[in-house]
Amino acid sequence: MLSRVADSIYWTSRYIERAEAVARFIAVNLNISMDLSTAGNQQWKPLVTTTGDDEAFTEIYGAATKRNVIEFLTFDRSNPNSILSCLINARENARSIRERISAEMWEHINRFYLMVKDVGDAEGILDDLPDFYEAVRNSGQQFVGVTDATMTHGEGWHFCQLGRFLERADKMSRILDVKYYILLPSPQHVGSAFDDLQWGALLRSASAYEMYRQRFGRIVPQNVVDFIMLDKEFPRAVLHCLTRANESLHAITGSDIEGFTNLPEQRLGQLRAEFAFTSATDIISRGLHEFIDDFQQRMNLVGESIGTTFFSLQTA
Amino acid sequence: MFSPGGSPRTNCQLLYKHIQELTSNDLRKRKTAAERSMIRLGITFNVYGEQEGTERIIPFDILPRIIQGEQWTWMSKGLKQRIIALNMFIDDIYNDQKILKDGIIPEHVVKSADSFRPQCVGLKPPNGIWCHITGTDLVRDADGEFYVLEDNLRCPSGVSYVLQNRQLMKQTFPGLFEAQFVRPVDDYCSQLLDALNSLAPDTVENPVVAVLSPGIYNSAYFEHSFLAQQMGVDLVEGRDLVVRDQRVYARTTKGLKTVDVIYRRIDDDFIDPHVFRKDSMLGVPGIMDAFRAGNVALANAPGTGIADDKVIYAYVPDMIKYYLGEDAILPNVPTYVCWDEAQRDHVIKNIADMVVKPANESGGYGMLIGPRATKEEHQKFVSLIKANPRNYIAQPTLSLSRAPVIIDDHLEGRHVDLRPFIIYGRDIYVLPGGLTRVALRKGSLVVNSSQGGGSKDTWVV
């Protein structure tokens, strides 16, 4: 497969997953603010903080009001991680490889993009926010379904999987991180109904609520961390994502899953193994936020090495 | 569609009846549905020099244009004859130059053409075929006669729209196709792939074919991508390819892969910075070297543009006579070449009735349409011609035929032309149909999509 094509497939899939994740972030907050009408519910700044775009946001918008944050994360073209920017990028990438992906995939991305763009062009979207973000999440998931059902499960498909699962692992960890930033009104609220509601909202935004209930029943923070980070079978859990990404990486090179033949295999393999042999107690005792921070930095290194190993046109 | 008396032509009666039965609202709805479907499918072209919203659809008119079978048979015979002669001409120009020595075409006309490539002199492509894919523009005059308006021998665009338009028509008027005997066009991509495969060196058993595109911002990018997709071959850009030891390789995730045949959609100027424009970032350094060594086939071969210079065009009937000993089946539009003093005087004297075209522009740019222009514009073109006579030709304004087009909720006549596509591989294949382009502005003669032209499906019945 052409390096440029592999690169574009990988990024198309990452951008679609990212758009979906941003919609989930916003849904966490919308959920919380709808559930709670007392003080402490209007915290929008943390969303910007977790996406890492604090500086750019403050420069353009100043105050972190609901409207500003939503505009910045959803339709702002100057924010490379806004939902609209992600879809523009996904579409540009897909357009450059139309001949390699299925017609259905292209058509779906094109429609997805047009849908978001049209909503952005129209006024008054704030009234229908939950519907809109649900539509974004649905479209993201439909893309996965269309891809799975229409694209040959060969090298290109594995690059698609690789991009999707790495992005999902990264963003799931960030969703968990949102909880760290959304402050409770006071320390006494830890473990209160208030706290519970926030964890529940978080699980819902991760599409993990029902599956969590089946696995653990009561909502206990440590179990939520366990489920989101370390579950082997839940398709959105970080460990599951790392495992699937690792499988696709080895399918691409044809190398033995137990070993490594290049840098991305080594880095991802190590990271996955550490997740497989850690526990929620370990994570919490290290500090959840610190753990996530370290995880994200290592994910960046995995991404970088994939770029230089497979996509860089200078090598070869 | 209609005969001069105003009644529908024989082969159009079924369609006519079908349309009569539709309300104007119906027509509009079907047209909107077809165009929406184009947006959804991303059947677009890029407009140069604009920022966002640079992708547009070519407005699509759902009334097909119908061409009678017998007329088509005659036309395709003419097109085959023409493409054979043109290829013999190109091969001759870059090798023995007999036609110049015999004085059929003045040497200075060829040598002064912008599209003449001294770098191609002495090249011998397989079977002496240089131009494998051609799109020839035809127009019909008031007398019902078809004339060749120009030959596009470099990277002719539009065939993807022919194929997509047909798909859209099947969605729009499903019932009609069962009853009509419309010749199918779906064969095109198989024919193209066969032709490209046939260009590979005999030693190669399973040739690797690729379509070479300047990239996503090119106006015809949709077409490049579509053709690669339909043939199931790689769409590559210059940066995907590398030349080592006179061989062309693609950079893949598993290292370098040999490429045997390239359908290139990059202009000569940009294809190889070692040989042509040094500043080109689009091309592949060293690809001409590999081509010369016979290690890669290029379709169309660089240099083919010499035969679609508009001054050279004026000599095509002479070429047909010279190489084939036959009279041209399809006539040219009468053409005056301005480098010739007598013809130039005639053009200048009659400038108000002439269409004046620069020899080397495409897309309908830089033209004068005498009867529609002001006195100042006439004067401007007179001085342009005097300053650079080699660069201009002039043709009398034809009374271009018109076809009915849906405008809002009713039909109006608009000028049309026709671009059939010809593939020259082991045999010559003429796609039954072609791109009918429509000048959508009332009274306009310009059909180019870059200037707001639309398109129609073309039915050979």
Image (spheres, rainbow, N blue to C red):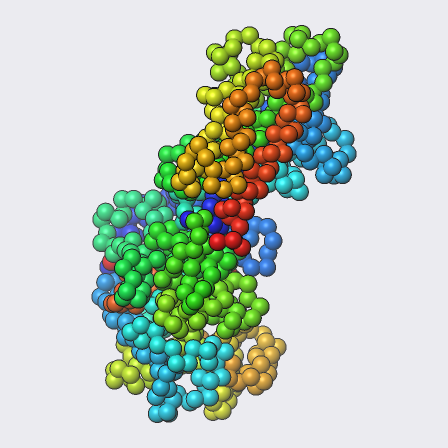
In the displayed structure, does residue A73 sit left or right of residue B397?
right
Direction from residue A152 to residue A54 in the image, left or right: right
**Relative to A229, residue B299 above or below:** below
Q: Nearer the viewer, residue A206 or B75?
A: A206
**Percent of width and height locating residue A56:** 72, 39
Nearest the viewer among A113 and B296 is: B296
Instruction: Residue B334: tell me if it is visible.
Output: no
Which quadrant of the view contains residue B25?
A: top left
Residue at image x 69%, y 35%? A53
**Which residue does the image show at 72% across and 13% down from the upper left?**
A38
Depth order, front residue of B397/A69: A69
Image height of B332 relative to B169, above or below: below
Q: Could you tell me residue A107's position as x and y percent?
A: 44, 41
Residue at image location 47% in from the left, 37% down from the top = A260
Look at 66% across and 42% down and name the residue there: A78
Q: How many marks?
A: 0
